[in-house]
Amino acid sequence: MDTNQYMDMFLDESHEHLQQLNDGLLSLEDNMEDLSVLNDIFRNAHTLKGMSATMGYNKIAELTHEMEDVLDLLRHEQLKLTEDIIDVLFKCLDSLEQMVDNVGNGDPEDLIDVSDLVTKLSALSSGNPEALAAASEAPAAAPAAPAGEAAPPADLGFELTDVERGVIKQAQETGLRGIHIKVTLAETCLLKSARSYMVMNALDELGDVVKSIPPAEELEQEKFEHSFEVVVVTAAEEKVIEDAILSISEVESAVVEVIDLEKKAEPAAAAPPPAPAAAAAPAPAAPAPVSTAKPAPAAPKTAAPKQAAAPPAKKSHAGQSVRVDIEKLDTLMNLMGELVINKVRLEQIGQTHRISELTETLEQMDRVTTDLQNIVMKVRMVPVSQVFNRFPRMVRDVAKELNKEINLTIEGEETELDRTVIDEIGDPIMHLLRNSLDHGVEHPDDREAKGKPRVGEVGLIARHEGNNVVIMVTDDGAGINADKMRRKAVEKGMMTQEEVDKLDDADAVRIIFLPGFSTAEQISDISGRGVGMDVVRNKIEALSGHVDVETHIDEGSVFKIKLPLTLAIIQAMLVKVQEEMYAIPLGSIDSTINIQPDDIKTVQNKEVIVLRGEIIPIIRMEQTLQIPHVKDFDEIFVVVVHAGEAKAGIVVDNLIGQQEIVIKTLGNLFTGLKMFSGATVLGDGRVALIIDVATMMQ
Amino acid sequence: MAKELTTLKDEMNNVVDEGTQVVAFKLRDEEYGISILNVQEIRNLTDITRVPFAADFIKGVINLRGSVLPVIDLKQRLGLEQTPYTEKTRIVTVTVDDLHVGMLVDAVTEVITIDSKPVDAKKAVNGKEITRFLSGIGNMDGRLIIMLNLEEIIGMPKESK
């Protein structure tokens, strides 16, 4: 089978299942008594096994199979759950993740040696001293054994109409036989209708299909669980038919049985009226009765009702979302951007020519475009849980490694951010969390000595704040010592003693974000290689965000990341310098002021202004950007901007106004040009460059 | 189809063969040509927004139906003497390796089919610096059409410092 086309789906879903397995194991670790989680874990492992086997990744399948055996024993309480077992299972997940990644990168899956894990697992599932050997046999064999025994063909759950019976009878007279086949597809089968169609096709070649349960239409619409039944008249041997069906991929089993009309006639004759009704009911009716009649192949009896109930609930949920290529969304966003540009252009025409009808229509159009814009933006939004959900596992591992006791609380994981931002914030948050775990939270003994609970609290909180999303990493650890920061900065030659003495405590703590700074007494594997915090700051600022820290000694620290909701459309102030127009992102602007030329003072030959007692350096855009000088202006406008905590006043000739702009990249020809974060098309069709305030201030 | 086009494109960039359609345009008194497959459209001169700190032959950016397109001055790029813009000045927008660029030319003359195999530029012209921008010279009964190597001309983001 050509499985390439399913590759993306396989990768996506494998990651999803691995994530769920991870989550499951974590909650199991928290509460080892809660065995109900095991059923979920088991189901995920089972699905993963099916999927990888279908795709031909036997190593993944093998490992998950062994995991499944152990899980099965666990959930039947034939094996006692211990921390060791959980550790082994976690290791399995890591290996699985690597294998799936390898597969995704086009590498062979067996780059990683899992034989050790497999041995450990099989030792766990079989080596238990108690009479487990016999017990483990049964569950281990269960997945392998097809539905054959579960649904004995003797009391076939189907009925034949008189016509059908006639056809079979006729066929028998010509030397053919009526055959009943029950086909079970793999639980993981993604294209059930396609598979059933292939089965029907194969059977058509061997003989004539008389009937199928459910009917062909419903098979096409996937209105069946995992199995369906077919009646054919054929001259072919049962074995031939069985082989033909089993050769189709994702078919788990095929039970072929010759129909004995005489035998079937009896129950049908005994109760003719209810029979057809009963026959009609199970097929299209709700999945529940069907699955109880034919239990899922791998599901042992105790779990059967639960398993039967869970999948349909999940399915209805999955039906509400669609996977869309991110490129399509980008195109949509671009088109939306063009629409906004043209709308602004029309508005300007309406204003210049004072056409009231046009203006009125435009007002309505404005409402529609605003709604449209919001929806397009929302489509691109992804909940931060996509990034957050990998952290509990990381925190657990790191905490174990450091011998610390940590309780991670995640809040606001439903907060949404633009897809482009989401993809980028994973690493910075990971850095911050590691930092909190390593440097923030103290060792349990130290904590006790300080009168704090042994378990350290680490929080990961996301929430909306105006047009921004704020993500906070909090801990109740030791806090950051401002004096220690000052001392280290001087020791490392990053600052002079006078410089650090000038800093207040809050600023001294911010030294942590400077390049090359690390306070760890001892370089550890987790953090403190001196690359952490400034990398975090760079990354966040590259996303037009901002990161800050607040700390109290022995109470803990809060790292706060502030990010814009989206990077595609922003509010900006348009300014004019001589004949050129530039856009300054509103997010970087504090205020705008109008001053006289002699309000500009100099400090050591550097021009500054005094604004409400604050001395602010000024940047003359005309000189900085080498803008050709055309005429003089009497008035001076200053746009006061900030980047981080630093402030500056940008001198411009005129303020045009505040406007929504669509950010376009300048393209490859301008790589290395850091002064501009992009360009935008204005209402009059001209292009204005967007100033990168942080770069300009350097 | 798409694959055919790209191989065709590759051919055009390197060697221009007989039967190739080229867009011919003027830079001062000389006639130049680029394969029609690289040309997206020909536009009248519009407002060009200057980009400070960009390479000197990059004139700036224009708005091409809502997207931002860099424009280079071809004469400056080829080291030819500057002449003022006229009403005949055009922006020829081209695509090379997914890079979209507008090129300022003095006038667009016509689309012609090269009917004889062009001469290798290295043989016809002296000077290494010039020839790296040229791919060949078409001779149409004494009318010389200088074929440009677009990849060399615009495929150089490193130089735009």
Image (tube, coloured by chain):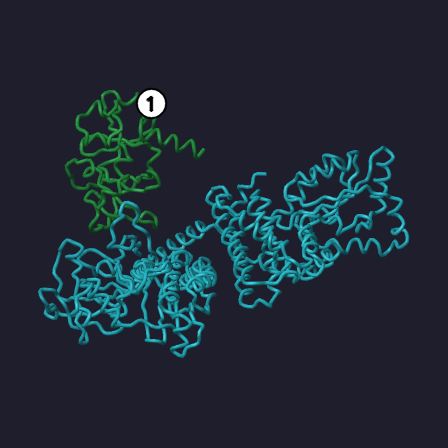
Chain colours: A cyan, B green
Q: Is A409 on the left-hand or right-hand side of A348?
A: right
Nearer-the-camera pick, A655 or A499: A499
Residue at position x 24%, y 28% in the image: B146
Residue A350, given in percent of the width and then of the height, sits at 33, 60
* Identity of the residue furthest to the bottom in this view: A451
| Residue A147 shows in this picture | yes
Identified by mark 1, the residue type is Glu
Q: Is A380 on the left-hand or right-hand side of A544?
A: right
Residue A316, given in percent of the width and then of the height, sits at 61, 59
Q: Is A97 on the left-hand or right-hand side of B128?
A: right
Nearer-the-camera pick, A541 or A427: A427
> Element at badge 1?
loop
- Which residue is denoted by mark 1 in the rendering? B18
Place residue A564 in its image quadrant.
bottom left
Classify A8 as above or below A463.
Answer: above
Write down the chain letter for disc 1.
B
Nearer-the-camera pick, A586 or A172: A172
Residue B129, given in percent of the width and then of the height, sits at 19, 32
Quarter the N terminus of chain A occupies: top right
Quarter the C terminus of chain A occupies: bottom left
| Residue A660 shows in this picture | no
Residue A455, given in percent of the width and then of the height, sits at 45, 72
Classify B140 as above or below A226.
Answer: above
- What is the total number of numbered labels drawn onto the structure image? 1
Near mark 1 (Cα within 10 A), the count class, few <14, some 14-19 or many ≥20, is few
